[in-house]
Amino acid sequence: MKIIFPLLALVGGMAVAFQAQINGGLGKKVGAIEGSFISFVIGTLVLFFAVLFLGKGNILAVSSVPKWQLIGGILGAFYVFVMVLVVPKIGVAPAMVAVIAGQILIGAIIDHFGLLGGVKVPIDVKKLTAILLLFVSLYLYNHK
């Protein structure tokens, strides 16, 4: 049963690649900011109905969370905007390699220091080597 979560993450990654191409095409037609907005509005509507019909949490508890935890939406909007802007210029795969490199780098730093309430997972030589190789792959993938 442990395999379900990595598989869901894999499928989520696949969805992000499709999303990048779809949103990139949308942005070329309507503009980068406008395309990002349209994408977020549609996503917001989907989530609204999911909360309405499937939600079991307490959405009103949002008033009790630390305010810094609300910036996730800003970061999501920034990500969608960047992908809408970048994908039509460099393609999906180079954009995804760069996104993954950024995610792994910052994820390793967050884990190492236990930032934002996370569990501390120290960076060791093996992880540093993997991060370095990831950036080598970013260079190789984008170098012409």
Image (cartoon, grey):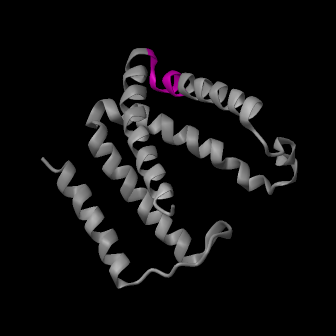
Q: Position of residue 58 (x, y in %)?
A: 84, 45
- Quarter-of-image position of residue 28: top left
The residue sitting at 34% across, 69% down in the picture is: 131
Residue positioned most to the top: 29
The residue sitting at 39% across, 50% down in the picture is: 99
Indicate yes or no whether the magenta region holds residue 119: no
The residue sitting at 27% across, 37% down in the picture is: 90
Q: Position of residue 48 (x, y in %)?
A: 71, 29
The secondary structure that dominates the magenta segment is helix
Q: Is residue 12 left or right of residue 137?
A: right
Residue positioned most to the bottom: 125
Residue positioned most to the front: 1
The magenta segment: 30-36
72 vs 132: above or below:
above
The residue sitting at 21% across, 49% down in the picture is: 142
Indicate yes or no whether the magenta region holds residue 32: yes
